[in-house]
Amino acid sequence: MGKMRNVIIWRMLPVILVTSVAAFWFNDVQQGGPFILRNLVPLALLVLLSWLTLYRGRGRWFGGDRRMPLGLIGYAIPALGLSLYLHYAYSINLNEMFTDVRHPDRIFQYLPIYTIVAGGIGFAIGRIVGRNV
């Protein structure tokens, strides 16, 4: 059990590093606004799903079946990708998307809901594809 725990911790380090950098960047973009904690929930779910995937795979990403790793990828792409993209768009005012908006930071109020739902759909699709592989 001790060796598997060390392997899981070692393999979780890149996931934790990427999500930590994203969390600090989200805080910088939102300037510590009131919605920062709720925007970290999709990242926390990504870390939790990664840990669960490694735990079920006994320390390997593809240790068990293909359903959990493909579900994890299916969650990460829309959840993390959409969140990163919208934070980037807000930070540089991409195509003047936020110029004429009265409260442009309100996008962060509902963004976690969108990213979790999109990630859940991606997770389900990944699990279905993994079942058929």
Image (cartoon, rainbow, N blue to C red):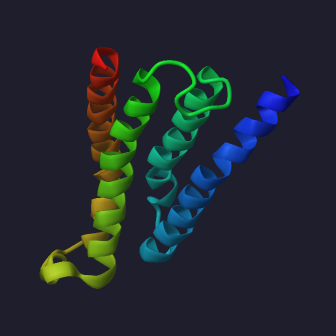
- x, y percentage for residue 96? 14, 83
Vertical comparison of 6 with 125: above or below = below
Vertical comparison of 39 with 2: above or below = below
80 vs 71, nearest the viewer: 71
Vertical comparison of 88 with 96: above or below = above
* Residue shown at the point (31%, 53%) measured from the top left: 111
20 vs 31, nearest the viewer: 20
Q: Is residue 27 left or right of residue 101?
A: right
Position of the C terminus by quadrant: top left
Q: Is residue 15 left or right of residue 82?
A: right
* Residue shown at the point (54%, 19%) measured from the top left: 64
Numbered marks: total: 0
Q: Is residue 131 left or right of residue 94?
A: right
> For the view shown, which residue lies furthest in the top direction?
131
* Residue shown at the point (56%, 42%) measured from the top left: 47
* Residue shown at the point (45%, 31%) measured from the top left: 69
36 vs 12, nearest the viewer: 12
- x, y percentage for residue 110? 30, 51
Quadrant of the image occupied by residue 123: top left
- x, y percentage for residue 3? 84, 31
- x, y percentage for residue 53? 55, 29
Quadrant of the image occupied by residue 20: bottom right
Quadrant of the image occupied by residue 130: top left
> For the view shown, which residue lies furthest in the front direction?
133
Position of the N terminus by quadrant: top right
